[in-house]
Each structure stands twice: as structure tokens, then as C-alpha cells.
Amino acid sequence: MKYTKYILGFLLLALVVIIGIWAFTPTTSPQWTGFGPYDSTINGPRSKTLWDWLDLLIVPLVLSVGVWFLSSTEKESEKLVELDRQQQSVLDLFINQISKLILENGLKSENVAKDTRAIARIYALGAFRRLSRERKAEALQFLLESRLIDNEPIIPLRGANLREAFLDHAELVGAEIKGAYFCNACFKQANLTEANLCGCDLSYVDFTQANFTGTDLSYAILKNAKLRNADLTKVKLDWADVEGADLRGAKLSREQYDRLANRDKAKLSRKDLMPISLKKGEKKNE
């Protein structure tokens, strides 16, 4: 069972606590424990007590528990190592498959067959479903550096499972990743300059200190996203859903604010918005 180790540990701790209480308060302990006073002239020879058994079993018991705990920890460590090896194998296989399609099947050529692109997309979606959050970031970076997901991407990632992807400090300049699922991902200090994330699910994403210059977040789901103090003045936010999003201290114009969905449910005060930009010759209404 998954929690067997914790249950046994709790029971052992409870037993130690009870025995400790009896040992420090012998007058209140049961007679069979052997901690309290005993008069053999009145009650006769005393039979084996809990203390006598503890005296015999304490050392082998401690050794057995120690060996079991070390063995359990070692097995857990081996499982983690094996899981990491499997994850690396999936990533390596994915990179090899895509590289082969590029070199042998002309994936990046203008006249590439539709079937080749479809196969590449299937490889990508399958890999993202199986990869850990760190390796999702590596796979995504590989696709971008191979120029497969920039403007008008060769491998569209609509519907890709990029949940919980660890993208801190990621360089996603010019990436086009429309309609992907980035729920609970982390984009701390990521460079999203000119990135197109239109229609992506970015719920609960942490964008702390991310660069949003020219980023397209239109129709994106930004529910409960962390955008505090973010500079969003150069971001396309048309009908982005910001329900519960933390926009406190963010730089945002009133024009942008008026185009947001569920803006009244975001953590943002309208009075903190930047003034509406006026066209030449236009006067501000009082």
C-alpha cells in the first residue's frame, strides 16, 4: 500500500509515546507493564512483564525497523531513478523522430506531404502527454529552436498537454502555440516577446517577471493567473478571461481592460488603470 510506511511509523510512534508515559508515571501504569512497584512477598514471583520483553526485543526490533526503513527508502529512490530514465527515453525518442522527419522526409520544406506533418504532430502531442514538467519545457524548446513552432507553425500544438510545464527563464521569442493547455505551468522570468498564445488555457499560471512585449493573449484563459506588476501595455488581450487573475500593480490601459472577459472578477482596481490613449486631435471627455 502507498501509505503503509506512514501508518506503521505512526503506530510505532504511538506505542513509544504510551510506553514512555507509563515509564515516567509508573504508579499509574498497569501492573503487567513492570514499571510500577511490585511486592513479591505478597503477590508471589512476578511473571514476564512488558519491560522484560522490551529488554529482550528492543535491539532486534530497532534493527528490523531500521533495515525495513532503509530498504523502503532505497526502493523509492530506485523508482524515481527508473522514472527519470523513462522520461529521458521518451524525450530522446521524440527528438530522434522529429529529427528524422526533418532530415529524411523534408518536414520543413514547403512541399512536404500533409501526412508527414500529421505524423510529426502526433509524435509531439503523444510526447507532451507522457513527459514530466521539466522535459515538456525541453521538448518545447527543441521545437522552437528547430523553427517548427514559430510563425505559421509546421507542427501546430493546438490541444497539446503542456500542463505544469516548468518554463522559468524560457526563451519563447516568436513562438506560436495556439490553443494549448498550460494550466498550472510556470513562466517566471520567461521571455514571451512576440509569442502567440491565442486561445491557450493559462489558468493558475505564474507569470512573475515575464517579458510580454508584443505577446498575443487574446481569447486566452487566464483564470487565477499571477500577473502582478506585469507590464501588459504591449500585449493583445482581446476577450482574455481574467476571472480571479491577480493583476494588482500591472500596467494595463483602460482600452485593454474594457476588452477583457470577466474583468469585474479580476484582482484589479479600475482606478489603477493607465489613461486611455488618445488619437491625434481627439479630446478627452470630462
Image (cartoon, rainbow, N blue to C red):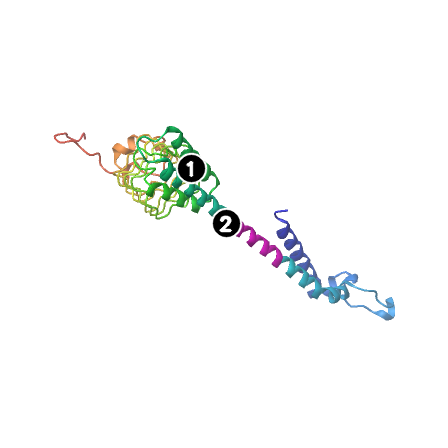
| In-image side of 142 versus 127 (left or right) | left
Q: Main secondary structure of the magenta part?
A: helix
| In-image side of 275 versus 267 (left or right) | left
| In-image side of 89 versus 213 (left or right) | right
Report how far apart the C-alphas of labels 2 and 1 lie in the structure: 19 Å
Q: Quadrant of residue 178?
A: top left
Of residues 213 and 92, the one drawn nearer to the viewer in this rendering? 92
Residue drawn 64% across the image and 60% down it: 67
Provide residue 147's location: percent of width, then percent of height: 32, 39
- Quick one: label 1, few (<14), some, or many (20+) residues within 10 Å? many
Q: Which quadrant is home to the C terminus?
A: top left
Count of marks placed on residues: 2
Q: Which residues are magenta?
A: 70-82
Q: Is residue 77 magenta?
A: yes
Provide residue 123's location: percent of width, then percent of height: 44, 36
Residue drawn 48% across the image and 46% down it: 89
Provide residue 185's location: percent of width, then percent of height: 41, 42
Type of residue at label 2? Arg
> Which disc, if any, is residue 124?
1
Give the mark, 2 or 1, whose residue is nearer the N terminus.
2
Secondary structure of residue under mark 1? helix
